[in-house]
Image (cartoon, helix red, strand yellow):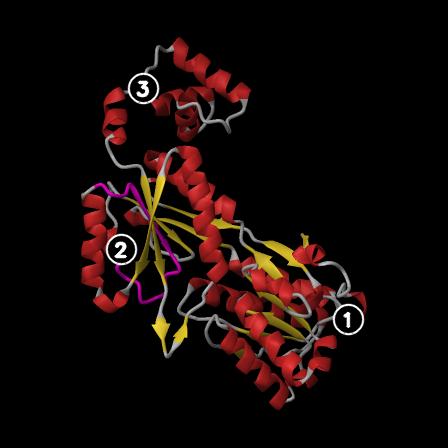
Amino acid sequence: MNSEQIARIAGVSRSTVSKVLHNYPDIPEDTKRKVLRVASAYGYKPDVVPQLIKSSFQKTIGMYYFSKFEENIFERFNANYNIALLVSVSTEAKQRGYSVLFDVIDLTRGQEALLASIDEDFNNKRISTAVFVGLDDDCGFITKLARPDRHIIVLDKEFDTSTGLRCLFSNDLSSAMRACKHLYDNGFTKIMHIAGDQRKLAGRKRKEGYLRVLGKFNQEYGTKVQPLIMEGRFTIEHGYNSGKAFIEQRLYEQYDGILCGSDMIGVGFIKCLNDLEPKLLERIGVIGFDNEPEDVFVKPSLTTLAPDYRYFARMIFDLEQNYEEFKAGVSVKIEQQLLVRDSSVPYAKRRSNLPLQEYIGVRT
């Protein structure tokens, strides 16, 4: 008997059998008893040789972050996302007996040098799994790293999983559609989009969601709104410059809802309007992505779509510890939570006089 046969008889997944035999705390007691009863009845004992081989490897998650320094602007793509994710992964690592290695991907050295460095991390057993964060379309080196015996997980980037890559990403398409529906339900029916970097999956999916839902609104509600997209980077500067264009081109006469490709864009946009035409903020609704700390310090406080960092962290280790089940590759979409603050509700309903702790947002 092997674990796959035990799983079939017990009516559970192979990963559940593995978790039961390794005494994972998140397995229900009735499931544990069922699996142990079947294993006992068939005299099943895990093969200790693979376990010993596995235990000889360094149990270290390598977190590789991709950032760029261009045109004197540090790309603050999901700055809080990066930090919060690293903290969540580090916390989960402690609970599961792992350590975390942090590194930054620098493409200026060339992709071959980068490949050699990560190959060395794997070959010298400094890491057991490599997790890549924030990649854009320039990062074609990932597929060259993929091998059947390597644990490679990519966040917020889609690859061909037949190579064995595991891809985890936020469901930005549905989140963008949900954000537009939230604006529409609050009376902001003429929506434009200040988009982020189209070289990144998040930027493309949020733009796609905007276009899709705007077409749906025009068809179902007869809104007849022409799509307007301002493309740029995931930066405060892009948001601020878009705010200037919004004022100078009198776009407020055509649009009253602003879907921002990130919170940094939203913060810059709100800052610009506060500087130049603060009264406009009483007439428009604004929403962003990523749940950055700055959101609660701008006025109006910024509504956002928040990633579930702890779920990302748990999924990373579930994929790492159940490699056999997922070695053929897998894609997992993770939903985001809508945190409702002042920027996306009508002016008369805003909570500007409430204490700071109330600005955390209403999760929906």
Tell me: 67 left or right of 342.
left
Amino acid type for the residue under numbered disc 3: Pro
How crowded is the residue under tag 2: few (<14 C-alpha within 10 Å), some, or many (20+)?
some
| Dominant secondary-structure state across the stretch colored magenta | loop
Residue position for label 3 = 46
> Which residue is at 25% across, 25% downward?
52
Q: Nearer the viewer, residue 296 or 248?
A: 296
Cβ atoms under marks 3 and 1 closer than 8 Å = no
Q: In which quarter of the image is the N terminus?
A: top left
Q: Which mark is residue 89?
A: none
Q: Which residue lies furthest to the right in this view?
A: 348
What residue is at 72 percent from the left and 70 percent from the top? 221
Q: Which of marks 3 and 1 is nearer the N terminus?
A: 3
Amino acid identity at mark 1:
Tyr
Reply yes or no: does residue 270 show up in magenta.
Answer: no
Q: From which residue to which does the magenta span run?
A: 125-143
Q: Name the residue under label 1.
A: 347
At label 2, the amino acid type is Thr
Residue that carries the numbered disc 2 in the rendered image: 143
Q: Which of the 4 quarters of the picture holds residue 266?
A: bottom right
Earlier along the polypeptide chain: callout 1 or callout 2? 2
| 1 vs 2, front mark | 1
Q: In the figure, 122 relative to 175: above or below? A: above
